[in-house]
Amino acid sequence: MLVIIEARLKQQGYEVRSCVSGLTAVREAREWVPDMVVCEYQLPELRGDVLTRELGRVPSLSHVPVVVFTWLEATGVEEKCFEAGARAVIYKPIVRDLVDKMQRIFAGIPDDDFES
């Protein structure tokens, strides 16, 4: 999935950096301050909600929107992610217009497909 997201975002001209774990993502984000963080809920070392909360605790990263992907629809994942500060939770399989949705998040435009 990461390869698909990377490819679509790069096609649209975004700079993309990948991380293999939640802890690595926090370290990278502190050094690079991304415009957006896109992650799986079930990351090695830190779940997506925990990663979101950790990023929110860093003053230079608290404004960065986080989008979490998951298969786990009925397990309270969505509530955990939103409570932690995630901007969106997207259920797999990934929708075709993924890049459009991310561009709307960047622009601060409400998206009826996301619940908040």
Image (cartoon, rainbow, N blue to C red):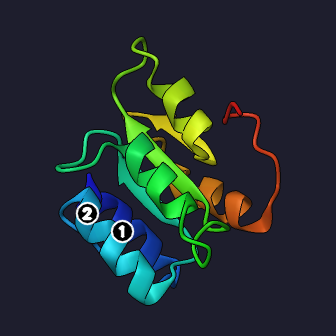
Instruction: Name the spot of residue 6 as percent of width and height, x first.
Output: 34, 69
Residue appearing at x 35%, y 22% in the figure: 72
The disc at residue 23 is 2
Horizontal relation, residue 114 to residue 36: left or right: right
* Pointer 2 with pointer 1, Cβ within 8 A: yes
Residue appearing at x 75%, y 43% in the figure: 111
Residue appearing at x 60%, y 36% in the figure: 82
Is residue 17 visible in the rendered image? The answer is no
Q: Nearer the viewer, residue 84 or 72?
A: 84
Residue appearing at x 38%, y 53% in the figure: 39
In the depicted structure, whether residue 35 falls above or below residue 42:
below
Q: Nearer the viewer, residue 33 or 2?
A: 33
Is residue 115 visible in the rendered image? The answer is yes
Horizontal relation, residue 43 to residue 59: left or right: left
Q: Circle 1 sits on which residue?
A: 26
Q: Nearer the viewer, residue 76 or 93?
A: 76
Looking at the rendering, which quadrant does residue 79 occupy? top right
Instruction: Name the spot of residue 86 as percent of width and height, x first.
Output: 58, 46
Identify the amino acid type marked 2: Leu
Alpha carbons under labels 2 and 1: distance apart? 5 Å
**For the C terminus, which image quadrant?**
top right
For disc 2, the neighbor class at 10 Å (few under 14, some 14 to 19, many from 20) is: some
Instruction: Name the spot of residue 57 as percent of width and height, x first.
Output: 55, 61
Identify the amino acid type marked 1: Val
The disc at residue 9 is none
Q: Nearer the viewer, residue 2 or 34?
A: 34
